[in-house]
Image: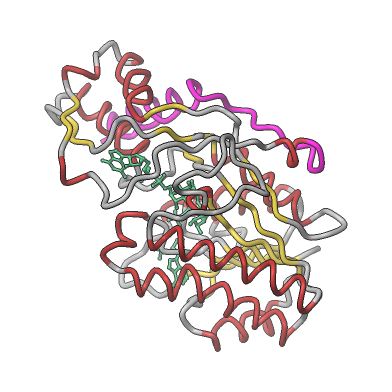
């Protein structure tokens, strides 16, 4: 039975990836940092089947000890300070976790077992002020936030450990992916939760920032399959993963509100507090390399994703 070690196990992607790897017969070891309250909501249905162990990307020794003890064949580095606005308030912490944390894991691999296959969760935020439309593996980066800068470091250190030490280190450049398990602070979940609250009379309006930015949104459940496929290839590489479609925040609102028979214009208020110091206006992927080499295709389309998220929030609030 192969062993996979996943950092960021308590996050959105950690939960979907665990489900996938369990189905494929892996032993799953999930790394969680210490917290004063239980934060395993997204993986509570898996707790009998996976091991959740303590470790932190800010602590080199903990990573070395985990690789020594659990001897994984595959490491998926999903942990990060992943919320773009927080990266302007805590830029140094974002750099330490999201950028240097990658080096710490790669160093642990280099010292404990350089044969481990490594997946780095890179991001379309690295494209930032886009230099080419659509964005593919060769598109130059132009990050627009401390988060984007930190991810760019994580990407390049992954490429460097591949080229310097011959480690199977792969970088998945994933475009936005969402689900009912998405954190409530991200715009898609903020909208689906807002729509459900308004529908049930629990809120009167929904305050958002820039409605004109465009994102290539897919379903997280589809994207973890791409992560696994990347580690099953003969050679490590960089892969862009997305749907190849883009939609504005406004369009997301239109579909979400109209699904419950409401017009978003009656409820959405634009609030300067949610604007960013620098915006990424347009992201759209060209995932042809993933399609050709990984045979990967997203299964869930934009409208289906919006409806899935709104329905899940309606159901959650109905249950109280
Ligand atoms: P998420 O829900 O925010 O999860 C982030 C995870 O990282 C959480 O489990 C968090 O633990 C953990 N973490 C944070 N700081 C840590 C530290 N110092 N040590 C160990 N763990 C730490 O993010 P996600 O949406 O699942 O995304 C997974 C990864 O893909 C992230 O690296 C993200 O930046 C990247 N990414 C995401 C997207 C997307 O659209 N979702 C697109 C491209 C790339 P706590 O629960 O304790 O906070
Ligand atoms: O949902 P968001 O916060 O996601 P963002 O910034 O695109 O980042 C996400 O995707 C990246 C991949 O490209 C990941 F790497 C990253 O970890 C994260 O998962 O914001 C999306 C868009 C932005 O343009 C933002 O300005 O929505 C706009 N927006 C408008 N009103 C808002 C709001 N975003 C948030 N979070 N909250 C608002 O009220």
Furthest residue in direction right, as rendered: 234
Vertical comparison of 80 with 219: above or below: below
Q: Image point 24% across, 14% down: which residue? A: 263
Left or right of 287, for residue 196: left
Can you give x and y, in whole percent of width and height, for residue 245 in the image? 55, 27
Can you give x and y, in whole percent of width and height, for residue 48 in the image? 57, 59
Furthest residue in direction front, as rendered: 131
Q: Where, quadrant-wise, is the N terminus in this rendering?
A: bottom right
Magenta segment includes 293: yes
Furthest residue in direction left, as rendered: 204
Give the quarter of the image for residue 264: top left
Q: Image point 12% across, 27% down: which residue? A: 204
Ligand 2 position by quadrant: top left
Q: Image point 36% across, 54% down: which residue? A: 84
Q: Where, quadrant-wise, is the C terminus in this rendering?
A: top left
Can you give x and y, in whole percent of width and height, for residue 251 in the image? 37, 22
In the rendered structure, which segment of residues is drawn in magenta?
A: 292-320
Left or right of 40, for residue 62: right
Q: Image point 70% across, 32% down: which residue? A: 297
């Amino acid at each position: 039975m192969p062993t996979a070690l996943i950092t960021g196990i308590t996050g959105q992607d950690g939960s979907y990836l665990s489900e996938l790897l369990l189905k494929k017969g892996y032993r799953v070891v999930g790394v969680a940092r210490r917290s004063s309250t239980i934060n395993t909501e997204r993986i509570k249905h898996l707790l009998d089947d996976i091991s959740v162990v303590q470790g932190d990307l800010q602590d080199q020794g903990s990573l070395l000890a985990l690789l020594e003890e659990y001897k994984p064949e595959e490491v998926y580095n999903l942990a990060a300070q992943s919320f773009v606005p927080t990266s302007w308030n805590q830029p140094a912490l974002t750099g330490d976790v999201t950028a240097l944390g990658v080096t710490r894991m790669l160093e642990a691999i280099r010292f404990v077992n350089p044969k481990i296959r490594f997946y780095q969760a890179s991001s379309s935020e690295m494209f930032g002020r886009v230099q080419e439309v659509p964005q593919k593996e060769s598109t130059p980066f132009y990050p627009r936030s401390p988060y984007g800068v930190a991810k760019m470091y994580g990407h390049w250190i992954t490429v460097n450990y591949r080229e310097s030490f011959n480690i199977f280190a792969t970088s998945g450049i994933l475009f936005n992916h969402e689900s009912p398990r998405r954190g409530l602070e991200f715009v898609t979940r903020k909208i689906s939760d807002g729509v459900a609250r308004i529908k049930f009379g629990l809120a009167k309006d929904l305050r958002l920032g820039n409605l004109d930015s465009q994102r290539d949104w897919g379903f997280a459940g589809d994207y973890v399959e791409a992560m696994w496929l990347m580690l099953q290839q003969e050679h490590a590489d960089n892969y862009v993963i997305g749907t190849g479609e883009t939609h504005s925040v406004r369009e997301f609102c239109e579909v979400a509100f109209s699904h419950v028979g409401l017009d978003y214009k009656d409820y959405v208020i634009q609030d300067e507090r949610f604007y960013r110091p620098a915006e990424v206006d347009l992201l759209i992927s060209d995932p042809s390399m993933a399609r050709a080499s990984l045979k990967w295709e997203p299964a869930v389309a934009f409208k289906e994703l919006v409806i899935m998220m709104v329905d899940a929030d309606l159901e959650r609030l109905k249950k109280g």
